[in-house]
Structures are given as structure tokens and as C-alpha cells.
Image: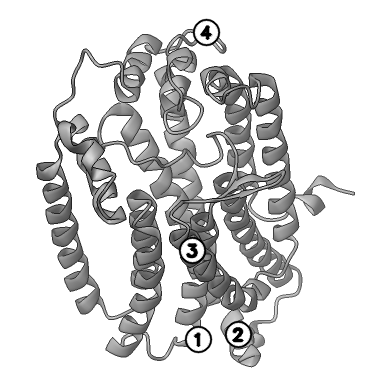
Amino acid sequence: MKVSKIFRGDRTIWVVFLLLSIISLVEVYSSIGLFAYSQNGVGSPTSLFFKHLFIVIATWVVVILASHVNYRYFSRFSLMGFWISVVLLAVVLMMGGRWFHLPVVGQFQPSEVAKVMLVLFIARQIALKKEQTDDLGTFLSLLIYIVGVVVLVLPENFSTAALIFLSCYLMMLFGGVNRKWWWRLFLAGVLVVSVGLAIAYMRYDKGTQAEAEKTEQILERSTTWGHRIHSWLQPNPDELSQENMARMAIARGGILGKGPGNTVHARLMTQAHNDFIYAIIIEELGMVTGILVLVLYSFFYFRCIRLAWRCKGRFGALAVAGFGTMIYLQALANMCVAVGVLPVTGQTLPFISYGGTAYLFLGCGLGVIQSVAADVYDEKKEEEVVPEPEEEGAVITDDTNIEKQE
């Protein structure tokens, strides 16, 4: 079987995914040591690396399988998947945690499932309402779905909630919703979030962290947000914090880095394999590789937007734009934290950080992107082989199929 038959879709995106996976395997193996020993003997660096390797391979299988599925089927599945993810979010919130502990799988984060399902669901809703996208009622109905998921995620993970909202809210703009109301709410949201974070910062007091544990959950999390903003705005250079270690790792790496496996600061950071892996990449492989990683994500996003523009159906175009935006924004957030441009967010570096639920479900999103790409390129080949100028415009798009499903 030809390789092109297996890896359907955009070849450039496959190459980007391959390079990110290789960087991931090298850097996770190099940086996971302290985290492994901090788990009270639960796992060794080698065993955790092979667990990550298994997740990476499983993600590749998921992406390949998804790329062979007609992407229009994801529209129908999104309806059920969305409500399942909402139920999972509600259950884990009532349990007072962020994840379920499952055998073999380990930690399972419902918020990662919700990220994928909400993108597909919003793309479906906009495609179904293509004639009413400019109506205020459509704008409000889409907003209710997005805010509903965000409210369930927010108490335990502000950064993920913000990422979900911004990605899906941008999808609404791409889908042609009422722009007047879109910009009004966007500016109002920026104001509310800014005021909220300012309040969290002002109420933060190192001496009251123990008392915060006795308060309601949302107030406890606001203390965490306040601490992160405080550490970002008023860093203590003498503190051996994750943030300071990341800065030192970047400074030590220089232009070309110290070489794979020669990290010093990863041995002192429990999150070197996860939230701060970008700093370890620069320490070992240099600023040149750090810039290359940024270029890879940027080129990936460019290819997604190009695919969305070429896709004739609204569902496929919006799904690609939504997943591309989400992955790119998450990558930017992680890299900005590592270099000190943003306070700590807890966002992983897509397809590079240590694998888990986030890695696998982002792979599902990538599989949808490649499924759309395969459809776009297959359609282009058919037009080149059998040109039918008189049939132009008589193309059955995914919108038509979605309406038939309804």
C-alpha cells in the first residue's frame, strides 16, 4: 500500500506533526526525571517515557484513522459528544476535582473532551443556521452553548476555560455571526476579565493561602490566579520557582543549546516535561530550535486557514479553523509563559509536552483537520481529471448533508 494511501490529507501538516512528535520524544525523555522521582515510586523515568511513547503512537493511530473517515460524519457525532462532555464536566465539578482516575489510562480530563466536542458542535450549529448567522438570536444561542461549557470548566481551570471561549468565539466570527454584537461582547469580556484578574491580584496575600482553603472553591482558585499574577508582575529572583528555572534554562541554552540530554534545570523542575518543556527545548537545542518550533506552529496554522478557505462546506471549514486556532493559541500561551511574557497558565505545548488526555484528544482534532484536507484534495483531483464546467456550482457540500441528517 502506498504511503499516500495511509497518510491522507495535507502532507505539510503531516510533516509538522512528525517533527513535533520527534522533538516531544527527545525532550520528554530528557526532562521527566524529577517528576518521576516525585511520584513516590509510582513510576521510573523509563516507564513514564514508554507511557508517553505509547500515547504518541496511539495519537498517530487516531489521526490516521480519523483522516480516513468522511469528515461529515463528525457533524452527527458532535451532537451526542457535546452533551456527553457536558455531563462529564458537571460530574467532575461536583466531585471537586479536574479529572477522573481511570485504570490503565490514569488521569482523564473531561475538559479536553469538551474542547474537541464544542468545536465540532459550534461548527455544526453555524452550518445549520447558514441563512440566519447574522441574526441576534443565532448569536445568543451559540453564545449560550459556549458559556455553558466555560462555566463548568472555569472553577478548576481558568486558562483552559479562556482558551475554549476564545477559540470558539473566534469561530463565530469566522462563521459570519453578527459582527456588531461580536465586537461589543468581546470588548466587554476583555474588560470583565481584566477587572477580575486585578481583583484576584489585589486580594492575594501569601499569609492567607491556608485560610483560602476554607473558602468556596472559586475563591480558592482566585487566590491561585492572584499568586500567579503576583509572581509574574513582581518576580523574586532569589526564589527557586518553576518560572525562574525556566528563565535560567533559556539563558543557559543560548543560540545553539547544550545538546540533547545536557539539561541542568530540568533536574530541578517538576513540570519540565509539561508546562515548561519549551524552556528545556531552548536549553538543550538552543534558541534556533525554539524559533523553529514557533515557525512550525505558525506554518501549521497557516495551512489550516488555507484549508478552511478552500473547503466548500461551512462545517468542514469552521471545524478546521476552530481546531487550528485552538492548537495555535495553546502553543502560543505555553511558549509565552516559558519566556515570561505571560503568567503561568498550566497549558501544555501541543504534541510536545508529556502525553495524556490532552495529547490524545488534540490528536482527534488534528484527525478532523486531515479528514477535511483529504476531502479538499480528492475533490481537486477529480476536477482536474474530469473537468465538467457545466456542472460548476452543483457541488454537494457538507451543509447539504447536515441538513439531510436533520
Mark sitting earlier along the chain (2/3): 3
Helix, strand or loop for disc 1: helix
Mark 1, Cα crowd under 10 Å, few <14 / some 14-19 / many 20+, is: some
| Left or right: 404 as drawn, with respect to 299 | right
Q: CA distance from mark 1 to mark 2?
A: 7 Å
Label drawn at residue 262: 4
- Tag 2: residue type? Ile
Foreground mark, 1 or 4? 4
Question: In this figure, which residue is indicated by the disc labeled 1?
Answer: 128
Q: Are marks 3 and 4 in contact (CB under 8 Å)?
A: no
Mark sitting earlier along the chain (1/2): 1
Mark sitting earlier along the chain (1/3): 3
Q: CA distance from mark 1 to mark 4?
A: 54 Å
Q: Are marks 4 and 2 in contact (CB under 8 Å)?
A: no
- Tag 3: residue type? Leu
Residue sitting at x 55%, y 76%: 313
Residue sitting at x 68%, y 52%: 63
Residue extending furthest toward the right = 1
Q: Nearer the viewer, residue 303 or 41?
A: 41
- Tag 4: residue type? Asn
